[in-house]
Image (cartoon, rainbow, N blue to C red):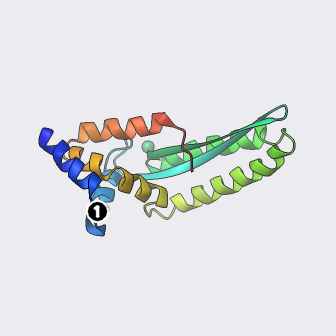
């Protein structure tokens, strides 16, 4: 483990090349889904936007999650449904942000069908290359990392 951490620091401080990035992406994608445990499909990552209007205030959150396509779609659909029901009521922002979130969610859901690593997954792997390097031989640590990512929820970009 200590040796892994030293290697991880090295990777985090130096730019990684594409070959290395792709090997980390494949590693992350071959893990079991942190939500349902499924191992039959490659993991991906997605952002799901939820808009909720309360009187005149709106609450817009974007949740980042990693999981198998089925779980990511479930999360995305829940956000879409909640937004469709509760997003419209705040004037004027509800009328602007609600369709924006709905369109983005639908696009995200379509993209999950292609089974290519999403841009957001590639960004995640690139930003966390050091951590991934230090735990790459430890499936249990990789699962802990993926579960924590999903529980953090909020993502600003
Ligand atoms: Zn799953």
Above or below residue 19? Residue 47 is above
Left or right: where does residue 69 sit relative to residue 156? Answer: left
The image quadrant where one finds the N terminus is: top left
- Identify which residue, 123 or 73, lies in the foreground: 123
Left or right: where does residue 129 sit relative to residue 65? Answer: left
Position of residue 59 measured from the top left corner of the image (x, y, whole percent): 71, 37
| Residue 125 sits in quarter | bottom left
Above or below residue 44? Residue 78 is above
Mark 1, secondary structure of its residue: loop
- Identify which residue, 136 or 75, lies in the foreground: 136
Instruction: Tell me what residue is drawn at x 27 percent, y 61 percent.
Output: 23
Instruction: Tell me what residue is drawn at x 72 percent, y 54 percent.
Output: 100
Regarding residue 134, the answer to whether it shows in the image is yes
Instruction: Tell me what residue is drawn at x 70 percent, y 38 percent.
Output: 82
Label 1: few (<14), some (14–19) or many (≥20) C-alpha neighbours in 10 Å:
some
Instruction: Tell me what residue is drawn at x 43 percent, y 49 percent.
Output: 68
Residue farthest toward the top in the current orientation of the protein: 55
| Residue 123 sits in quarter | bottom left
Position of residue 33 measured from the top left corner of the image (x, y, whole percent): 38, 43
């Amino acid at each position: 483990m200590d040796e892994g951490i030293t290697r991880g620091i090295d990777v985090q401080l130096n730019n990684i090349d594409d070959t290395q990035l792709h090997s980390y992406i494949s590693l992350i994608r071959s893990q079991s889904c942190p939500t349902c445990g499924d191992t039959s499909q490659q993991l991906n990552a997605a952002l799901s936007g939820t808009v909720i209007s309360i009187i005149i205030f709106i609450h817009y959150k974007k949740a980042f999650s990693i999981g198998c396509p089925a779980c990511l779609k479930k999360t995305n659909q829940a956000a879409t449904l909640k937004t469709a029901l509760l997003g419209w009521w705040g004037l004027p922002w509800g009328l602007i942000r609600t369709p924006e979130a709905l369109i983005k969610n639908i696009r995200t859901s379509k993209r999950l069908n292609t089974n290519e690593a999403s841009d957001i997954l590639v960004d995640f792997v690139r930003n966390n290359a050091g951590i991934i390097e230090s735990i790459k031989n430890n499936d249990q640590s990789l699962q802990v990392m993926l579960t924590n990512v999903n529980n953090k929820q909020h993502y600003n970009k």
